[in-house]
Each structure stands twice: as C-alpha cells, then as structure tokens.
Image (cartoon, grey):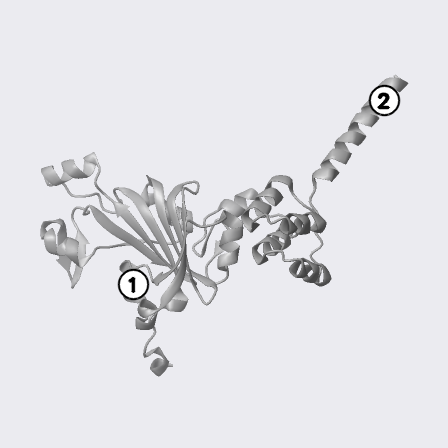
Amino acid sequence: MRYLRAIIFVCFSFSVIAQTAQTLTNKDIINMTTIGLPSNVIVAKIKKTGGKFDTSPTALKELKEAGVDNAVIAFMIEGDQPKISVQAQERPMPDRWRGIVIDESSPDDAIAKFGKPEKDELTKFPRGILGDLLTAKAKEKKFRRLEYKDIEGVDKAYFTFSENKLIAIDLDIKQGFSPNSLPNVYGLEFRPVFGTLSTALHPEKFERNQGKDYTVRYPTFYHLVTKSEKTFIDAVVENSGFGAVMKDLGGARDREGNFPGKVAWVQIVSRTLENRDGADALK
C-alpha cells in the first residue's frame, strides 16, 4: 500500500509539472515574438495552451519594448480578467457579435479574435436599407473594412471601422434561420420594411393604408429592422422557398404576424452615424 501511494504521488507530481510547463508566461510571448511568429499564431497558441500573464503597467511596457503586437497584448489582458460564463458570452446582443463590440472594438481586437483577414481595405460604407438613416458625411467617407471567410455559422463576416472604432458588422449567414426568432434572439421588436422596387414591381402583394404599404404576400426579399440604444439592426430575409412559390401561384395571403423565409444577411450599425441634421434646433 505504501508503494502504491508513492507511485500515485509521483504520477500526480509529474502531471502538475507538465501542466505548469505548458502554461505560457510573458517570457514565452516575448520569445515567440523574437523568433518572428505572427500575432495570430501567438494568439492561437494562447487560446490552445492558456497562460498566466503579468499585465501590470511595468510588464506591459516590457512587452511593448520587446516588439509584442498590440493585438497579442490586448488578448493577454483579456485572458487575465475574470471568466464570463459560456452562456453569457454566446448570447447574442444588439451591439456586438462574438465579443466584437460596436463603438468599442478596434481592428486589432478583431484580428486578435479571428486572425488575419481575407481583405483589409478602405471603402465606402456598406450600403443597405439603413443607408437612408445615415448622415451624408458618413455615406461619402472612406472606412476601413476587414473581411473574413468561413467563420463558424457565416460564409463571410465584415467589420467596418471609423477612427479605429467598430461602427458596423455585416454577416452573410451560412444557413438561414427563421426570422420569427429575431425578437427572442435580440430582445427587440422587429418590423418589416419593403424596398420601393418591390412595391413598384409587385403592387398586387401590397395594400396601402394611411400612406403606408402593408404586405398581402411577402416579396422574394424583404427587411426586418429594429433599433437599440446603440445600434440599428437590419435582417435581410430571403423568401424564395417552395411554400412562397405556391402562395404566389395560388394567390394566398401570408399569415398576419408571421415572417416567412430565412434570414440571409444581418447588418448591425452604430447609431453614432445616425442622421440628426437639424436636431439641435429642437433642443
């Protein structure tokens, strides 16, 4: 029995030593930077192995002087914070997506989270039905946009930045989901919006009451929009399934309160870009 206890103790000790040896420190990060590993590889190693980092002001200065990338340092600091439950991290919120937050996150934050983008370019603001809500200056300005492909659940994800802050998230959804789930997902009420082209080409699908268009049958594409304290959200719905075709052929009405089709695209836009021209005169 005494020998068995000794063996168990030795095995346990080696296990602890192995785990301790795998835990990264500031020195390991500096060493990986010195040999030329890119920031996304270092971040991936931290995610895989875990680390116990010194993120005091003095240690941060040493990291910076050693040439450690800002994205890596930011990830080290985040890993040093109290852990949030997985459920809380994964719950969709109207001002963020997978930890990237509107009006807060920087391009370095996105690169630390998702790695090197497929494209990194200056471009005009991605136009959509929300474009009518934005200032003329916002429509003309050039923004930095990062493009990613094949992130879990999406074909493409776009992050648009202004003055180093995230101002828009665009998601090309890989497998569409029911638009009726949107209010529960975000905790906000969505309303349908139809482009003028839809109402012009298919007047039979709409009824007009008190100057507004109400749908009899939803068009092939339509929008569900809402707003939160910080953002506008536009969900583009594709309504081209077999059921939609049969309704068109039979002239059937869509059930009131039910949104047909699948969500194909989601755009989240900062309200800092909202057109408030002339609002000061009302104060």
**Does residue 270 appear in the picture of this structure?**
no
Image coordinates of residue 63 in percent, x first then y, are 67, 57
Circle 1 SS class: helix
Camera-side residue of 112 and 130: 112
Type of amino acid under label 1:
Gly
Q: Is residue 195 above or below residue 174?
A: below
Q: Quadrant of the N terminus?
A: top right
Image coordinates of residue 113 in percent, x first then y, are 52, 49
Residue found farthest to the front: 35
Q: Is residue 166 left or right of residue 205?
A: right
Q: Quadrant of the C terminus?
A: bottom left
- Few, some or many C-alpha atoms within 10 Å of disc 2 (few <14, some 14-19, many ≥20)? few
The residue that disc 2 covers is 5
Give the residue drawn at x 32%, y 76%. Answer: 277
Residue 136 quadrant: bottom left
Q: What whole-number distance in Å separates the C-alpha atoms at marks 1 and 2?
A: 71 Å
**Does residue 235 appear in the picture of this structure?**
yes
Image coordinates of residue 227 in percent, x first then y, are 37, 60
Image coordinates of residue 171 in percent, x first then y, are 37, 49
Give the residue drawn at x 39%, y 65%. Answer: 271
Q: Earlier in the sequence, mark 1 or mark 2?
A: 2
Type of amino acid under label 2:
Arg
Give the residue drawn at x 72%, y 36%. Answer: 19
Residue 48 quadrant: top right
Residue found farthest to the top: 1
Residue 171: numbered disc: none
Give the residue drawn at x 16%, y 48%. Answer: 216
The residue that disc 1 covers is 131
